[in-house]
Image (spheres, coloured by chain):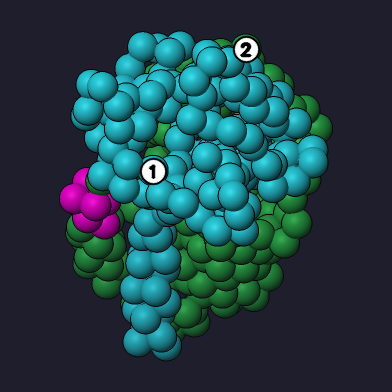
Amino acid sequence: MKPRLMLKYCINLIFVLVVSSLFGQTNDSIKIKHKYGLRVGIDLYGPFQNYITPNKKNFEIVADYRLTYRLFVAGELGKTDNLTQLDYIKFNTNGTYLKAGIDYNSYQNWLGMDNMVYFGGRIGYSRFSQTLLNYTINSNPFFTGIPVSTPQTFDNLNAKWFEIVFGVKAETLNNLYLGFSFRTKFMIATKEPPNFKNLYIPGFNNVFLNNSGFGFNYTLSYLIPFKKK
Amino acid sequence: MKKISFVILLFLSFCGCEKDDICIDPITPNFIIRFHDILDASKTKKVVNLQIKNIDIDSIYRDNIDTTDSISIPLNVNQTTTTYVLSINSTAENLINQDTITISYSRETIFVGRACGFKTIFNDVTISLTEDGDNWIKNFILADTPLNITNETKAHVKILH
């Protein structure tokens, strides 16, 4: 996502935060009760990215469950079909991923509000296949390189990684939340294809040289409240 | 806590900005030839006004190299042989001497990385000279047997003249 667009989204969300905080001020009850329950939602950034670049498809379901006022168990489940076009290689990555971990809410809400500014951690696991669609040997330009375009598919690949999450969730309507999060990923282990490399992994995104990655999501989720305490 | 969160946010936003799509790793190696003296193979001997021309694609790779004792020439990754004409004294019409060398090899494709893609290395390399009765090239000495060209750190063949 272009930084400018991202900024626009952030500003929108901050606006939403401010507006919702104004509404929150009418609550005068002394006894503070917080909503506990299962919050499920979807990532809107994947479909948006797919709209901009049709070759990148990512669908993600997010969920979290409140343990205490500050602590949540959280996870994501997703499916990716992503084409990567580089200078000398073109390949497609197809697979699913699951992430599980915790979120810690560092935001002290005003009365009656239920927003989050949180950080957390995840363990991610993905199973996927890579299809090397074509490549051109990188050699002296004196001889024009002829592209090799016999697709090669590498199945049964997998990866495990750790994520640090920083994010915001704001209750915009009753029980309806908008949120975004940034994630930095660190590879733990990955099964590499022979004579090729997992340059893109579902849930991890681009694998940089030092085996790190970066991610972003923008979620719309709904809280199914179980109890208030 | 808010300050810490802000610092983490800043840290996270710059983490993704690593640039690694510029190819800096070694790619397909060139074939490195060193010219040595036929009378004393341990000494290098320069060639004068060398022209290097590829026959397969009928194109001049280097023209009129003043004096040099080594050249680095690309091998064709689309074929298993590459043929060059090495002409010494190429600027003097009455002194020019053209010798044709053919390099044969098997190819192996090696993955390098995101930015560089794949490279070729050349295995079981052999080199032959087309006899024309007046060859300036007298003999070849391969650096290894069998000769595999995997990098450009040293000369792969000595040409004695």
Magenta span main SS? helix
Q: Which residue: 26% across, 57% down?
A: A10
B141 within the magenta span:
no
Q: Which residue: 68% across, 70% down?
A: A67
Disc 1 residue type (three-letter): Val
Disc 2 residue type (three-letter): Thr
Residue B38 point in image, percent of width and height: 58, 45
Residue A150 marker: 2
A9 within the magenta span:
yes
**Rendered shade, chain A:** green
Q: How many marks?
A: 2
Q: Quadrant of residue B6?
A: bottom left
Marks 1/2: CA–CA distance: 44 Å
Of B4 and A125, the residue lying toward us: A125
Of A40 and B126, the residue lying toward us: B126
Residue B106 point in image, percent of width and height: 71, 24
Q: What chain is colored cyan?
A: B
Which quarter of the image is occupied by the N terminus of chain B? bottom left
* Highlighted range, magenta: A3-10
Q: Above or below — where is A84 with respect to A213? A: above
Residue A122 point in image, percent of width and height: 65, 62
Q: Residues within 10 Å of mark 1 (few under 14, many from 20)?
A: some
Q: Which residue is mark 1?
A: B47
Q: Which residue: 41% across, 85% down?
A: B4
